[in-house]
Amino acid sequence: MAAGSSEDVGKLLLRIAVGFFVLVHSYFNLRHGVEWIKGPLREIGLPAVLAYGAYLGGIVAPLMVLIGYRTRIAAPVIAVTMVAAIAVVLKTQVGRLTDVVGGGGLELETFLLLGALALSFVGGGRFGVRGGRD
C-alpha cells in the first residue's frame, strides 16, 4: 500500500469513528426532538431556536463526514456542536472523573471534538463520495 493510500485509510477510519459516534450520540435528539435543549440555551442567554442546530451538527454533518462529502466543511460543524454540547448541556462534567474506571466525564465528547478538528485540517481523504482530496 502506497504512503498516500495508508493516509487515506487512516482518514477513512477517523471519518467512520467520528461520524458514527456523533450519529449514535445524537440518536436521542432524533427520537425525542430538541425541545429539551431550549431551556438550557435560554438559561445562558441564547435564543431557543439554536436548539435546531443539533440536527445539523448531530445528524447532517456526521452523515457528510461518514460518506466523505465536504468533510472540511462538515467536520467543523461537528466540532462547534460538541463545544456547544459541553458548554450548554454537559458543563457539570468538565474536569470530573467517572466513578467506574477513573476516566474523564467527557471522554467521548472530547474525542469527537478533537477528531472533528483533525478532520477539519486533514480532510476526508480519497475514499469518499467526493473523491480526491477533500
Image (spheres, rainbow, N blue to C red):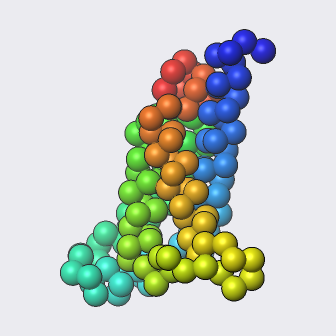
Is residue 56 visible from the viewing direction of this image? no
Q: Is residue 92 left or right of residue 30?
A: left
Q: Is residue 78 left or right of residue 27?
A: left
Q: Residue at x 23, y 76 (%)?
A: 46
Q: Residue at x 28, y 87 (%)?
A: 43
Q: Percent position (x, y) of residue 95?
A: 50, 76
Against 109, residue 34 (above or below) is: below
Residue closer to the observer: 39 or 3: 3
Q: Percent position (x, y) of residue 62?
A: 55, 50
Is residue 36 visible from the viewing direction of this image? yes
Q: Is residue 85 left or right of residue 28?
A: left
Figure label count: 0
Q: Is residue 22 left or right of residue 60?
A: right
Against 41, residue 84 (above or below) is: above
Quadrant for the N terminus, please: top right
Residue extending farthest to the top is: 2
Residue closer to the observer: 31 or 65: 65
Q: Residue at x 62, y 33 (%)?
A: 11
Against 40, residue 57 (above or below) is: above
Q: Percent position (x, y) of residue 61?
A: 49, 49
Q: Percent position (x, y) of residue 127?
A: 65, 26
Q: Residue at x 65, y 25 (%)?
A: 8
Residue extending farthest to the right is: 1
